[in-house]
Image: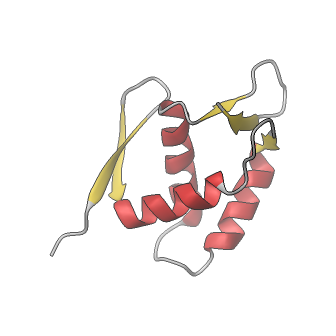
Amino acid sequence: MEEEKIQTVTSKGKKGVRIDKKKYDLVKKTILEHFKKGVEIPFKELRRSVEQKLEGRFKGSATWYFMSVKLDLEGRGIIERVPGKKLQLLRLK
């Protein structure tokens, strides 16, 4: 039986990648646990923390899944990059 997939989107509204929905949901939940309203998180800090929390929880590259889901969350308007900052900062939209 084939695993359920989800089609991600990009910030330009284009199709992203199709990934396993269970992995997507786990990574999304892990990313969003880091955000509270008004909090800005440096990209590198978020990536490291999410990768550590996902370590050993599924087969595949945690970094690849993190990037795919992060871009999807930006594309869906759930998180955004803080404009005008040299360092990439992310926050809830």
Tell which residue pokes out farthest to the bottom in this image.
Answer: 56
- Residue 16 in which image quadrant: top left
Residue that appears at 25% across and 68% down = 3
The residue at the point 58 percent across, 81 percent down is 56
Give percent across and percent down for residue 60. Answer: 47, 70
Quadrant location of the N terminus in the rendered image: bottom left
| Residue 76 place in picture, x, y as percent | 47, 33
Please, which residue is most extreme toward the top here?
Answer: 84
The furthest residue to the front:
37
Say which residue appears at 80% left-offset and 53% top-offset.
Answer: 45
Q: Does residue 54 appear to the left or right of 64 in the view shown?
A: right
Tell whether 40 sits left or right of 78: right
Percent x, y of residue 44: 77, 49
Query: Which residue is located at x 25 percent, y 63 percent?
Result: 4
> Above or below — where is 9 with respect to 62?
above
Residue 33 on image: x %, y %: 67, 57
Where, quadrant-wise, is the C terminus in this rendering? top right
Horizontally, residue 41 falls left or right of residue 60, namely right
In the image: residue 8, left or right of residue 55: left
